[in-house]
Amino acid sequence: MARAITLIRSAALSDVAEYAYAATAPAESRLIFLAGACPLNDDGSTAAVGDYAGQASKAVENMRVALAAAGASLQDVISTRVLVASARQRDLVAAWEVVRDAFGDHDVPSTLMGVTVLGYDDQLVEIEAVAAVLDQ
C-alpha cells in the first residue's frame, strides 16, 4: 500500500533525536486530525493509574483504534505531540519510550512536553497526532 507520508531528516541537525525532523504529505492526501489519545478504558476509567509507561501504552492503543476508524494506521501518522503531566524528565522519557517503540521505524516528527495537568482524573499521558492517507 502506498503511503502519503515522507519523513525528512537533515545531516545538518543532530542525529540524537529519535525522530525525523520534518514530514510531508502530498496535496492529494486526506489529513486526519485526531483528538488527544487518552489512557481511558472502555468504561471511562483511567488505565494504569500512577504508571507513565502504562498510560502511554493505553493511549497508543486508543490512538490505533481512532486511526483505524478514520481509515489509517500508525504508519500514516505525520506528527505527534506527547503530553506528560510531570516536571520530571524521567517521567517524560518513560512515556516517550513507549510511543517511540510503538512507531518503530516510522519515526515521525514529535514533540515531548511536560504539562501541569491533563483532563481526566489520574491522567498522566495524552498523545496528539495528525495522519495523512491517500484515498484510493
Image (cartoon, rainbow, N blue to C red):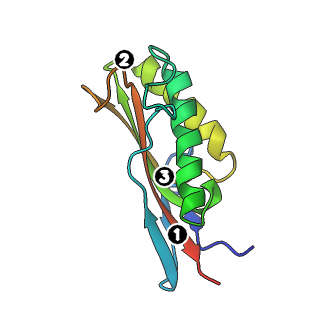
Which of disc 1 and disc 3 is earlier in sequence? 3
- Are there few (<14), some (14-19), or many (20+) residues within 10 Å of tag 3? few
Residue 16 in view in this figure: no
Label 1 belongs to which residue? 132
Which of disc 3 and disc 2 is earlier in sequence? 3
Q: CA distance from mark 1 to mark 2?
A: 33 Å
Q: Residue at x 44, y 25 (%)?
A: 46
Tell me: residue 35, above or below residue 113. Answer: below
Q: Residue at x 55, y 32 (%)?
A: 58
Tell me: residue 53, above or below residue 32. Answer: above
Residue 13: mark: 3
- The amino acid type of the residue labelled 1 equals Ala
Q: Picture coordinates of residue 70 (x, y %)?
A: 54, 64
Does residue 47 appear to the left or right of 104 in the view shown?
Answer: left
Name the quadrant containing residue 136. bottom right
The single residue placed furthest to the top in the displayed view is 50
